[in-house]
Image (spheres, coloured by chain):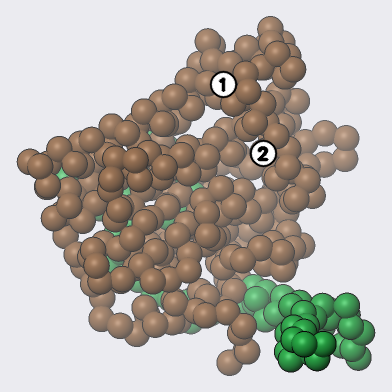
Chain colours: A green, B brown
Amino acid sequence: MVQTRFGAVQVQITVKAGAITDVTALQLTDDDRKSVQISNRAAPLLRAAVIKAQSAQVQTISGATVTSAAYLTSLQGALDAANL
Amino acid sequence: MQPTFRPSPAKHQAHSAPVCPALKSRTFQCMGTVISLALPAEDASLDDGRVLEGATAAVERVFAGLDAMFSLYRPDSEASRVARGEVTLREASAPFRARFADATGWGLLTEGFFTPERPDGVLDLSGIIKGYAIDQAATALQAVGVEDWCLNAGGDVLVSGSPAPGTGSPWLAGVVDPLDRGALLSGFPLGGTGRFAALATSGTAERGDHIWRAGVGRTEFRLSEFRQASVAALDIVTADVLATAIVAGGRPMLNWATDSWDIEVLAVLGSGELLATPGFRA
């Protein structure tokens, strides 16, 4: 482990004939990890800005669990009927 | 444009021309919902259509076996015998205890927002069994030699390969708009050359408030600030459990989930507004 000003970082060293020939950082610093986390957080988004899909383009439908009765009139039910 | 440290297959899909390959699907009922298996039409029709029939039968055996053990709607199931106190957890079968251990582990990882306990204190593993069944069905499909498929169990989706075999193009899953269930809110690419194979959606619209939220002392009903949450993950159990936990736990659980797991999330607030991770952005 090596302390840097961004936090602790784990490094791997390669030694050949008594000399260090390579140093590889194995772990992100805590600050790097934090910035990865923040950039992956969910943020408010307009409906027009999400990936769009038309019913005719999709091969399957994800939604809150559909009961057997509700399935008949669901989008997935329509897809399956079309692919019989 | 926020910097992102992960590849976003969604962006590439959104800009390429829509692919509408021919599919063949079969459905059956289990666990109170409908399960559908879709194969590329050319694969499905191999051997006079017996490939699709055989694959569907393999999936149905997995679901039926787990339903017989874990359904609380079957008085003779092991789950019902445990619920009635006729069998203790110590006496339960190894598979039953394994799923209990899974569910308890997820309860710890989600700070109790996913819980295998009903408000009345009854152990209910159904929250994890559907995802587990989908996962086991994948193994069964591999065993019967099918490589490209899409399995949908009541709105939870796991795929393998591509709808157009050999092309690397992903399956495109639509996400239902909870404000208009006949319309799609979004789409998400699964499988192909992309990184995610599973997409699960949890919500309060379809079955009422069926998500338990851990309270002080015992589990109880709470109104969720999210109407719906969709989670894309590498595996279906993670997607399913986290979608449930996010609807139960609201924003703190959403942030904990995106910080801790390799997932993409699209959540719909009670007002209809959206919260999304970068992978769901067009």
Q: Which residue corresponds to the image point at 66% horizontal and 56% vertical from the top-left?
A: B246
Quarter that holds the C terminus of chain B: bottom left
Relative to B145, is B1 above or below? Answer: below
The amino acid on which the numbered mark 1 sits, given as a three-letter code, is Leu
- For disc 1, the marked residue is B72
Which residue, as the protein is rendered here, is positioned at the far front? A17
Please provide percent x and percent y for residue B261. 66, 63
Give residue B99's quadrant in the image: top right
Which SS class for mark 2? helix
User: Same chain for the residues at labels 2 and 1, yes or no?
Assistant: yes
Query: Which residue extends farthest top?
Result: B86
**Mark 2 packing: few (<14 Cα in 10 Å), some, or many (20+)?**
some
Task: Kindly identify the amino acid type of the residue bearing the numbered disc 2.
Answer: Asp
Q: Find numbered disc 1 in the image and state the secondary structure of the residue it sits on.
A: loop
Work out whether A23 lies above or below B27.
below
At a point 82% along the width and 41% down the height, the residue shown is B215
Marks 2 and 1 sit apart, C-alpha to C-alpha, by 18 Å
Give the mark, 2 or 1, whose residue is nearer the N terminus. Answer: 1
Q: Which chain carries label 2?
A: B
Which quadrant of the structure image shows residue B51? top left
Q: Could you tell me residue B243's position as x and y percent?
A: 59, 54
Write down the residue under mark 2: B102
Q: Where is residue A62 in the image (x, y as percent from the top left)?
A: 43, 55
